[in-house]
Each structure stands twice: as structure tokens, then as C-alpha cells.
Image (cartoon, rainbow, N blue to C red):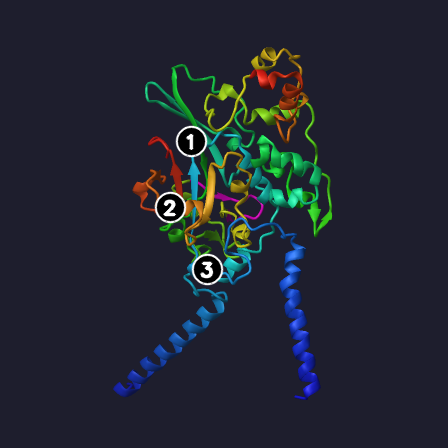
Amino acid sequence: MKRRSFIKQVLNGSIAGSLYLVWPMSANSLDVPEQIPGIRGKEYDSLNREFAFIVDITRCIGCGSCCVADKREYDVPEGNYRTWVERYVKGFSDTIYVDSPHGGLDGYQTPRSDIKEKVRDTFFVPKLCNMCKEAPCVQVCPVGATFKSPDGFVLVDEKRCVGCSYCIQACPYSVRFLHPKKKVADKCTWCYQRVRKGLLPACVQVCPTHARKFGSMKDETSEVYQILKGPGVLTVLRKEMGTYPALYYKGARREVI
Amino acid sequence: MGLTYRRRLLIVLISIVVLSAGGLLIKRLLLPKSFGVYGPYRADAIAEAALVPIRHGTNASCLKCHPYEAKIHKKGRHQAISCEFCHGTFADHVTDGKKSGTLPVKKEKEITTLCLRCHNTEIKARHEEVIKTVAMPDHLKNQNVKLTNNCNQCHHVHAPLKYINRAKQITGMMEAGL
């Protein structure tokens, strides 16, 4: 190789490289502050990442912001919900009444009128993917379309899914559905694409009372790390299923399933 | 005509080699690339999942171009509220750094409905320590205003107590502790 062509190639490479670093940032208008520290500006090593999600039931007011944000972020078809908010009403006879009109998308504007007894407590429980460490949906997938990534996200490979719905039946938390247009299984991903860009999941980002918390478990200063390290009581849904979810609930009554 | 023992053995061995080579070839042809790097799935699917376009920005992305709203919003009680919940997503408004659409502004009764998603005492589930709630139309009656009034006629939607506190200052009610 001649010296001239060598220098040309090196220069071209360095210009292209520097453009590559700058270009995606301006194109996505992502020059906003990072919400999850330590993700931007370095290579993402998925083997050395872990995340946790905490839902604080004592702070949830059932406004449905999360459901609206989720629907807008993914254009979720009518009648399917990647995340939803349930209303639990507990009567003095220990009867539990649960409802979730329209998945909580319209919020809860009126109290339940069909309960005859005196009400002891009313609370809201947001539901989303539990990101189980031992995920039943991953075990049952016959084509390897649902998998658990090394950083702990249970994701669906849309190109590989054949839409057999086996995973939908296997999920103990009913978070999966068959996308009516794409004809593949779809579910909450904890906004994987946002997390990879250092942003919080859309539902966490819009929650007005900070009832939804998300963060890195490898970062000892993150809020979720501090909560999980601390003495506060956290529960998971359907512990007896042995799924070991990475989604924790704070202040959940034992009736919550 | 009978085959010798050696010949039979050779046929068996050759068929084992041919079948296993064929099996491996078919496996390679049928399995997608990057299958099995981390486990029994396509490792490229992780990178594909990270490429899904983002529709929600953050409050910082909105307030960058709206300094007037930023000034009020950041001072008020509603500072924790996401712009995009009430107005719509960033992606519907801005594409590649340029304005690409107008977000609808909530009007009249829509505003009251939006406010009552959170500030509704009737639900009896919203803790006073988390959020201040009111019952309608009792709140309007108690404040001696028309029952047809919307929330935003007294409360600035970005800083709900902005006008209320100012009015109290002017009339001296703040000092009187009313």
C-alpha cells in the first residue's frame, strides 16, 4: 500500500468514526440528561448488568398515567395491555373485589357502586412483566423466540415467534398477549430500548407520585438498590410459583396476586 | 449373495458418518445466525430489541424549547408531572429535531376530567400524604364559585397554587393564615 492511500484511508476512517459517534445522538434528539447513570458513553456489557423494578402500592393513586404512556409508547392495540392498574377493594367481611375497567387507561373517576358492605380498604395495584429469573414463558417456547437476555430482560424475538400462544398460557401473571396485527406474542419489556439509552421506562418516567421505581442493581447509589438493601418489607407476586421475579411490590397486602 | 462381516461394518460406519454430517449441515442451514451465543435463542434479537424507536422523551426534552412553561412548571407543585402525560408524546411533536406535529390542548371539561384522574376524593383510595384530593362539586360550593367552573379557572395547570397564593398575598389572607 502506498503511503498516500494509507493516510487517506486512515483519515476517512477517523472521520467516519467520529461521525458515527455524533450522528445517532442528534438524529434521535437524545441530548437530554441521562436518567439511569452509567449507561451512556460506554460499551454496554449485558453480562454485567442487572436491573430491578419496585412498585410502591402505598403511593399509587390509580391515575392510569402509566397505562396511557405505555399505550402511546408502543401503540398497544385496543383490548390488550402491556401494563395495567387493578383496583382492589377489601370489605369488612374480608371479601376482595377486584376490577380494572379498560385496564385503568381512563383512570378511576368513580368509586365502585356495586359493593353493598362497608369498605375496609381500597388500593391500586399496577401490573406489568415480572421479569422472572426462572421464567415459565421462556421454558415453554418451542422455537426459542422468548428468551431471557444476560442482563435479565425477558424479551420476544418477533422474527422467530410463530404465534403458538404457549407462553401466553404459561405466564402466571397474564402479562402476555397475542398481538392482533403482528400475530406474535407481545409483552411488557420494561422499555428495553429506553434503558439501553439510559432513559427510564415510559411508565416510570410519567408516574406522578413516584410509585414506580426502576434502577440498576449494579449501582449501589441507585434508589432500588437502597430499597432492596434496606429492611423494608418487599414482596413478589405468586412466590409459590418459584419464578423469582425482579419486580418487587412495597406495601402489598397478602390478597394481592 | 452374502456380505462379509467387514463389509457390513463398513456400511454401518459410512452411514453413521454420512447421516451425522447431513444432520449437522441441516442444523446449520435451519438455525439462524447468532443462535446459541448466550442460550437457545437468537442473540441478535437483543440488539434488535434495543433499536425499537423511542416515543416518550423526558421533561427536559420538552422544557428545552418551552422556557416560559419551564419557569412555571419547575417552581410549582406539579413539577413531578410528566409533560407528555397531559400533552402527548415527544415523537408526535418533534422528528429529527424539527417540529412535525401539533399536540392537542385540553379544553374546558376535558381539563376537569384530567385533574380528577388524580385529585378525586370520591375514590377513597388516595392518601392525603401522597396527593391532595377534592370532592366535586363540594369543592366548588365551599369556594363559593359557579358549579360550572373548570379547575383551570382558578388553578394554573402547571403550578396549581400560583394564582391562589398570589391572591392570598394581595388580600392579606396569607398573613392571617387563611
Residue B119 occupies quadrant: top right
Q: On the picture, is B141 further left or further right than B105?
A: left
Q: Are marks 1 and 2 in contact (CB under 8 Å)?
A: no
Mark 3 on the same chain as mark 2: yes
Counting from the top left corner in percent of width and height, residue B27 is at: 44, 69
Residue type (three-letter) at the residue carrying disc 1: Thr
- Give the mark toward the camera: 3 or 2: 3
Residue for badge 2: A245
The residue depicted at 62 percent of the width and 39 percent of the height is: B84
Which quadrant of the rendered structure holds the N terminus of chain A?
A: bottom right
Which chain hosts label 3?
Answer: A
Q: Give the crowd class for mark 1: few <14, some 14-19, many >=20 residues within 10 Å.
A: some
Which chain hosts label 1?
Answer: A
Counting from the top left corner in percent of width and height, residue B92 is at: 68, 43
Q: On the picture, is B82 further left or further right than A229?
A: right
**Separation (CA) of disc 3 from disc 2:** 19 Å
Q: On the picture, is A137 further left or further right than B49?
A: left
Residue for badge 1: A58
Mark 1 on the same chain as mark 3: yes
Q: Which mark is residue A46?
A: 3
Q: Using the rendered image of the protein, determine whether residue A170 is visible from the camera's viewpoint.
A: no
**Separation (CA) of disc 1 from disc 3:** 33 Å
The disc, 1 or 3, on the residue closer to the chain's N-terminal end is 3
Span of residues in magenta = A174-185
Counting from the top left corner in percent of width and height, residue A69 is at: 57, 39
Which chain hosts label 2?
Answer: A
Q: Is residue B110 located in the magenta-colored stretch of the structure?
A: no
**Separation (CA) of disc 1 from disc 2:** 20 Å
Counting from the top left corner in percent of width and height, residue A208 is at: 53, 34
Indicate the secondary structure of the residue bearing disc 3: helix
